[in-house]
């Protein structure tokens, strides 16, 4: 009898030993090809749930596979530790964010270690550690010096009653959570990153292997459109501006403009509104301030607006065009002004109908008889009522009108983007302080490198919600100006956590380096990341920011590449009881329980077995016990005595073939990240080995070689049990330092035999078939033979006799 497989004992034993031996310590080794396998680091929420395991265990399997293949593998882990939940814990439960975060990290690190991954914990990075955010701040200064960080106006939620900025979650159905008064949007000076400078490059995904849908989402997010900027003449007493510029993709309809719409927050509105319209306009503007952008752009919302009493002139036909305001025009998009062409735009058509604005047709449908349009005509047609452009197909008109405008100096062809600059300021405590000082004499002065990091003060008063608590820490705010030595004030906003996660993959390359943000030589060795795995929900924020950041520092000469992640892979999600797991539904699978009971290897293997990784699958307790039984069988097969009774050559050849076929299948599946079929192949191999054991038909050497192959193929998936068995079978060194087996194509190939087919004992055909053919397949092939059919046609088959590997005899009468 062999010992019982005791996973929890084995897990602990090997995790301790691997840590002591520094088995997973990673150093730069130029003699080996490198492989940087990165998994998105977790936010420090407190507990690793099964979704984390599903993100991390399969990526560890893949990293281990690469390591066995001879790569020098970096597969690091760390924590995304700044952000709102920590601050909310402080507000609601009076726990300091630092304490809350570090306690969570402690727990999550313990859980991560229980997974048995190859993380080199010496390389751990924590974004709220001053040793880390010193460099986040350093990058901020670099971006500032290169004109990529700037102060600009950006809207915030403002309670006029409390006179404070409110966070989004402090606005409850448009009202202040404290005093219930209407919250308005107010423009505040904040820090922004000029991500729009990289809009074009961010839309290309040159030379990187990313899922198509993520690339499309990023392209749509950037939202590039070609169009024309057109100037309308403005002549209003007391107003300096002599024009209003609009952006349009349809300059061919310029002669059909019958109104113009400004965004309600356009600074011109107050200047241009006539006294009789003032009350109405102001009411509309303040109503708009209470709407979110999504509400404003909703297609369901009826479009309304207010005429402000003033006109601009269409330079092409001299017509007076009334100016309106409407909330569907956003100040931050384009120029904050659009031209209204009701005849050729559905939204403008509805607007004109509602407010009885003329609808002038300038692109004619083929069969148009000059009658009134029942709806907007948005298709192609010929230009009419358009002076010298009459008769031109409208697509040509787009080019011709733009050209004409450019000649006259009334406009120009231009490109517009949906994406805006990245708002980086957070009116929060738990983030890296923005390293800037305001001096009355020198203006904005960045904190010099020698004074970094600007550390977060420990004392913080969280009662000033919505505004940075740092603002009220006078001792911290008041400082000296690094330039003139006079008195200065620190910026009290903190940096958006997405900036901290825009460069963590660089820090992993040299986590303790203190001369610069990273050691350039080590980054040259490891970067770019070979495979980045994580959730598809990061398609546009994190993944776009990290790309922008890398492009920006490439242009500063800090790195030589612009794309940080060569390949991207998004895992699916695990559901339970046909539903997404959630605490309220009570269907949350707690990984700790299963790990304690069945061992990490079983949990790892089961997660990979339950479906293709990119699709996810459903968690069943019956499924996981099946996987647990399989690992128990592997345990027993490896340790129980094997006796070779009657070794025969054909059994040996067949086992050899199965081994090489399994190596080939498992390797191919690993390369394609097809872990579910990889596990199925290992299970089949285990079954086959059980049959060999029962028949005792191969030599002991052959048996041992088969077990050795099984263990190495299993090692990435089940690192603990494979290591334990490896040692118990008397091998030297860790199994995780072995070489991944290679298959020989000739040995993997199925052998063929000649099947003799008889009808009533007489030879009728000889058919070449695979040696592994099943009884049913052999009988079917025999009956389907044309030569056989001529002797069985019209007769009744009474029996089919099968001699395995040799003969089929069909008995008919
Ligand atoms: Zn209030
Ligand atoms: Zn100064």
Image (cartoon, grey):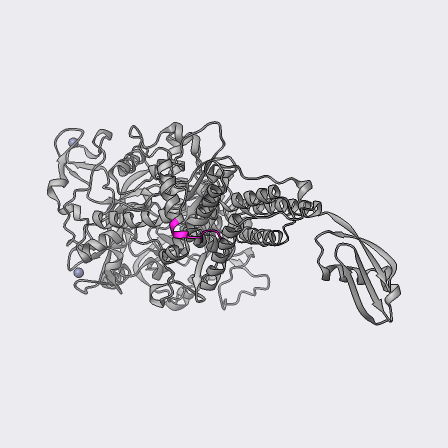
- Relative placement, left or right, of 33 versus 293 is right
Q: Which residues are magenta?
A: 1-9
Tell me the quarter of the image containing the C terminus: bottom right
Question: Where's ligand 1: which quadrant?
Answer: bottom left
Residue in the picture at 40% in, 31% down: 27
Res. 196 visible in picture:
no
- Give the quarter of the image for residue 740: top right
Q: Is residue 4 magenta?
A: yes
Q: Is residue 608 above or below residue 447?
A: below
- Relative placement, left or right, of 216 versus 96 is right
Res. 126 visible in picture:
yes
Q: Position of residue 640 (x, y in %)?
A: 52, 50
Most common secondary structure along the magenta stretch = loop
Label total for image: 0
Residue in the picture at 17% in, 39% down: 490
Q: Nearer the viewer, residue 34 or 538?
A: 34
- Give the quarter of the image for residue 532: top left
Q: Is residue 257 magenta?
A: no
Q: Position of residue 473 (x, y in %)?
A: 13, 45
Q: Position of residue 793 (x, y in %)?
A: 87, 68
- Relative placement, left or right, of 546 versus 450 is right
Q: Position of residue 344 (x, y in %)?
A: 48, 60
Q: Is residue 709 above or below residue 451?
A: below
Residue in the picture at 34% in, 45% down: 421
Q: Nearer the viewer, residue 633 or 588?
A: 633
Q: Is residue 742 above or below residue 264?
A: above
């Amino acid at each position: 009898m062999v010992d019982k497989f005791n996973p929890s004992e084995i897990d602990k034993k090997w995790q301790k030993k691997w840590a002591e031996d520094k088995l997973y310590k990673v150093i730069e080794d130029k003699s080996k090809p490198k492989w940087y396998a990165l998994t998105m680091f977790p936010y420090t929420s407190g507990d690793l749930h099964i979704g984390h395991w599903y993100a991390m265990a399969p990526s560890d399997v893949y990293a281990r596979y690469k390591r066995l293949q001879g790569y020098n593998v970096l597969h690091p882990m760390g924590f995304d530790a700044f952000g709102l939940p920590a601050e909310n814990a402080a507000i609601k439960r009076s726990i300091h964010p630092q304490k809350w975060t570090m306690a969570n990290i402690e727990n999550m690190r313990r859980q991560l270690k229980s997974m048995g991954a190859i993380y080199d914990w010496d390389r751990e990075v924590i974004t709220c550690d001053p040793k880390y955010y010193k460099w986040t701040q350093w990058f901020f200064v670099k971006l500032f010096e290169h004109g990529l960080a700037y102060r600009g106006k950006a809207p915030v939620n403002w309670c006029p009653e409390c006179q404070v900025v409110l966070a989004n979650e402090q606005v409850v159905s448009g009202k202040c959570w404290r005093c219930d008064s209407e919250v308005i949007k107010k423009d505040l000076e904040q820090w922004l990153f000029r991500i729009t400078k990289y809009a074009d490059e961010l839309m290309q995904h040159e030379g990187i292997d990313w899922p198509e849908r993520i690339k499309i989402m990023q392209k749509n997010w950037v939202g590039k459109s070609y169009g024309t900027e057109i100037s309308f003449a403005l002549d209003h007493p007391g107003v300096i501006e002599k024009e209003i510029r609009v952006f349009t993709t349809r300059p061919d309809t310029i002669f059909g403009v019958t109104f113009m719409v400004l965004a309600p927050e356009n600074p011109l509105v107050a200047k241009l509104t006539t006294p009789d319209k003032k009350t109405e306009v102001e009411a509309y503007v303040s109503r708009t301030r209470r709407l979110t952008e999504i509400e404003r752009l909703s297609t369901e919302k009826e479009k309304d607006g207010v005429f402000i009493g003033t006109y601009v002139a269409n330079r092409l036909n001299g017509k007076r065009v009334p100016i309106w305001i409407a909330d569907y025009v956003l100040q931050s998009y384009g120029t904050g002004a659009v031209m209204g062409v009701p005849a050729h735009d559905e939204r403008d058509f509805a607007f004109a109908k509602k407010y009885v604005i003329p609808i002038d047709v300038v692109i004619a449908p083929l069969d148009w008889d000059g009658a009134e349009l029942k709806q907007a005509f948005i298709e192609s047609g010929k230009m009419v009522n358009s002076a010298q452009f009459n008769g031109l197909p409208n697509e040509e008109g787009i080019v011709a009108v733009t050209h004409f405008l450019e000649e006259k100096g009334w406009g120009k062809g231009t490109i517009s983007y949906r994406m805006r600059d990245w708002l980086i300021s957070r009116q929060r405590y738990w983030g890296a302080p923005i390293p800037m000082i305001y001096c009355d004499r020198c203006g904005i002065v960045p904190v010099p490198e020698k004074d970094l990091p600007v550390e977060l003060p420990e004392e913080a008063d969280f009662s000033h919600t919505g505004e940075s608590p740092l603002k009220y820490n006078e001792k911290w705010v008041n400082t000296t100006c690094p330039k003139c030595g006079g008195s200065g004030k620190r910026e009290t906003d903190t940096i958006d956590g997405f900036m901290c996660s825009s460069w963590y993959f660089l820090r992993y390359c040299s986590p303790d380096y203190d001369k610069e943000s990273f050691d350039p030589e080590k980054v040259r060795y490891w970067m770019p990341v070979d495979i980045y795995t994580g959730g598809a929900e990061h398609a546009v924020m994190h993944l776009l920011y990290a790309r922008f950041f890398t492009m920006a520092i490439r242009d500063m000469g800090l790195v030589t590449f612009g794309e940080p992640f060569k390949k991207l892979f998004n895992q699916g999600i695990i559901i339970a009881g046909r539903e997404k797991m959630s605490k309220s539904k009570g269907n949350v699978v707690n990984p700790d329980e299963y790990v304690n009971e069945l061992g990490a290897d079983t949990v790892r293997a089961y997660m990979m077995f339950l479906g293709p990784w990119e699709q996810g699958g459903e968690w069943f307790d019956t499924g996981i016990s099946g996987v647990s039984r399989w690992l128990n069988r592997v345990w027993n097969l490896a340790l129980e005595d094997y006796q070779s009774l009657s070794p025969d050559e054909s059994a040996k050849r067949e086992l050899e073939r199965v081994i090489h076929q399994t190596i080939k299948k498992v390797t191919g599946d690993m390369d394609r990240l097809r872990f579910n079929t990889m596990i199925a192949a290992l299970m089949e191999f285990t079954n086959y080995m059980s049959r060999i054991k029962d028949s005792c038909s191969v030599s002991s050497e052959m048996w041992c070689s088969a077990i050795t192959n099984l263990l190495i193929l299993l090692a990435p998936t089940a690192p603990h049990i494979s290591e334990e068995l490896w040692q118990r079978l008397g091998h030297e060194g860790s199994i995780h330092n072995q070489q991944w087996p290679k298959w020989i194509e000739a040995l993997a190939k199925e052998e063929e035999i000649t099947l003799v087919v008889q009808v009533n004992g007489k030879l009728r055909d000889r058919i070449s078939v695979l040696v592994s053919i099943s009884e049913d397949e052999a009988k079917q092939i025999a009956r389907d033979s044309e030569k056989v059919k001529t002797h069985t046609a019209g007769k009744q088959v009474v029996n089919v006799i099968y001699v395995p590997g040799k003969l089929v005899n069909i008995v008919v009468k």
